Amino acid sequence: MKRTLLTIFFAAIVSALPIGAVNIVPQPSSVTEYDGTVKVPSRIRVYGSGEELNALAATWAQTLEKGYKPGEYDTPAGLKRIVSSATLPKVKVLKRSRRAFALLAVEPSMAEEEYTLSITPKNGVVITGGSVKGVWWGLQTLTQLLLQGRTMQEMTIQDKPHFAYRGAMLDCCRHFYSVEEVKGWIDMIAFHKLNTFHWHLTEDQGWRIEIKKYPLLTEIGSVRKKTIEGYYKTSTTWDENPYGGYYTQEEVKDIVAYAAARQITVIPEIEMPGHAVAALASYPWLGCTGGPYEVRQIWGISKETFCLGKESTYEFLQDVLDEVCELFPSEYIHIGGDEAPRDSWMACPICQAKMKEEGLANEAELQSYQLKRIEAYLNAKGRKVIGWDEILEGGVTESATIMSWRGPKGGIAAAKQGNDVVMTPNSYFYLDYYQTKGRAENGEPLAIGGYVPLSKCYAFDPYDQLTEEEQAHIKGVQANTWCEYIKTMDHVQHMELPRFAALSEVCWSEERDSYENFVARVEKSLVPLYEYKGYVYANYAFNGIE
C-alpha cells in the first residue's frame, strides 16, 4: 500500500503513543498503529508454512471453541458464571497459502518466543515467530483482538517475553481435578502466555500419579477416608465420604502431550522428604517409625516424613523418579523440600546413625544430604532439580534452582549466592489467598487466609534488592494455587482470574503500564475472553474493590 506523507506523519504520531494504548495483555514490547482497518471475515482461513505450523493453527482453533451457551449460571461454589453472546470466526486451516486471511511463518533469526504480528488491508494477518512457540504467542494476541470487534486496526506488533519461565502451579492433591478439567486449565494459562505448568502431584492428603512399581501408592495413598470441612483449625465438621482420584500413566502422557501442543512445559512435583503421609500410608516402611500411618484428612503440616537414614527410602525415591522421568520430558523435576519437620529424624536411631556416618552436623544437613543425592541421581538422567526455598537451609549445590515461596527473601538470598531462582512469593502470588479486605461483605468464598489483591500482584518487582549481575539468576515468576479450600475448577478460575493477568504482565512485559491502565486493558481484552469461554472470574478490581 502506497502511503502519503500525511499517512507517514500520522503513523509516526501513533507509534509514539504510550505503551498500553492498544488493549492487549500482557503489554507488548512495541505497537505501531496506522490509519487503515481490516474487516475480519466470518471464517478465518489460516495457512502455516509447514506441517508443524498448520498443526498449531488447528490447535488454536480448538481453543477458540465456546464451552457454554450465553447466559448467567450459578456454580457449586456459590459463584457466578457469565457467558457472553460473543462469537468468534470459525477457523479453517489451508494446505495452500492462496486465499488465506492469516499467514503463519517462522523466522529463525528471531528469539525463540519472539513474534511479530502484522495486520494490513493488503495481507490480512501475518504472524512471524522465532519458532513455533513465538507464533503461538502471536495467536494468543490475535485471539484478544478478535474478541474486541470484527474490524481490526491496521498495526504492527513486535513482542517477546522478558522471562523465559512463566509459570502457574495447580495443586491436584488436596482436591482432584479430572483430565478434561486439567486440559481446560492448560488452555486458560496459554491464553495468558504462560509457558510452564507446575503440577503438584503428591501430598499428605493424596498421591495422584500412578507408579507401576508401587501400586499401593494409588490403591491406598490416593484415597482419604474423610475430609475436614470449613476452616481446619476451628472446624468440627467432616465430610464423611471417602475422597480420592489419581492420574494413570496414560492420562499423564495425554496431558503432557496436550500441554506441549500448546507450547507449555509440564514440571511434575514429587514431594520429599515432607508432605509424604500418603506415601507412608501406602508403604509404612518408608517412615522412621514404621507406622501405622493414614492418608491425612485435615490440612496443615504433618510431623511424619520419609526416613532419611534408610537406604530403602532412597531406592524408593529413585524408582519413583525413574517412572516420572519417563512420563515428563521437562528439564526440571520438582522435589518439594518444604515444611519438613525434623522431629522424627531427631528421634530416629537410623537417621542419627546416617548423620554420624556422613559427618552431618544437624538434621538440616541431613535433608541437604538427601537433596544432593536425589539431585545427583536426576543430573545423571539429564534432569535438573528445583525445590522450595527451605532447601537452602542445609546448603545446596550451585546447580539447584530455588523456588522462593516464603516471600521474595529466599530468592534474593539464592540469587546472591549464585543459584537460579523462580520467584513465587506467597505475599504476591499465592492465589489461594483472599482478594479483598472485606471478605464477607464482598462475598468471597472461604480461603486459607492472606490478602493478595490484583494491585499487589501487579506491583511485584522480581529484581528487588538485586544487582544487575544477580538479576541474571532470576529465571521467572510463578503463581501458586493451593487447593485445600478449592473443590471445583470454577472456584480455581475465580481465584486465578484476573490475577493471572497481572502474573502474565509481570512475567512478559519489559515495561509496565500504570495499574489503572492495566485494569482498563484487562477489562477490554481479557474479560471478553473470560466471558466468551465461560470462565468464573472475580470482578472485584473492576468495581474498585480491594
Image (cartoon, grey):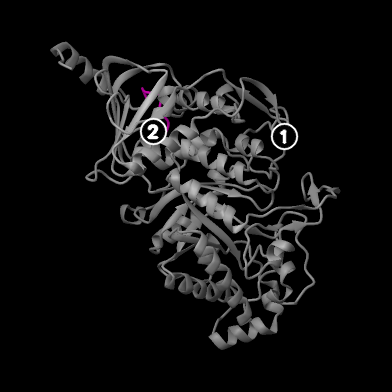
Labels 1 and 2 touching (C-beta < 8 A): no
- Main SS, magenta region, reads loop
Quadrant assignment for the C terminus: top right
Q: Give amino acid for label 1.
A: Ala
Lateral position of residue 435 relative to residue 18, left or right: right
* Residue neighbourhood size for the residue with mark 1, other residues' Cα within 10 Å, grouped as few (<14), some (14–19), many (≥20): some
Q: Nearer the viewer, residue 7 or 426?
A: 7
Q: Which residue is mark 1?
A: 77
User: Which element is circle 1 on?
Assistant: loop
Look at the image and tell me whether residue 108 can be seen: yes
Residue 293, given in percent of the width and then of the height, sits at: 77, 68
Q: Is residue 31 visible?
A: no
If the image is split into quadrants, where does the N terminus sit? top left
Query: Within the image, what quadrant is residue 55 found in?
Result: top left
Front residue (pair 379, 220):
220
In magenta segment, residue 3: no
For badge 2, the amino acid type reads Leu
Q: Is residue 83 above or below residue 228?
A: above
Question: Is residue 272 shown above or below 264?
Answer: below
For this view, does 452 lie left or right of residue 113? right
Mark 2 sits on what residue? 139
Nearest-to-viewer mark from 1 and 2: 2
Picture quarter containing residue 123?
top left
Q: Residue at x 24, y 41 (%)?
A: 107
Q: Residue at x 56, y 17 (%)?
A: 85
- Residue at 59 percent across and 87 percent down: it is 356
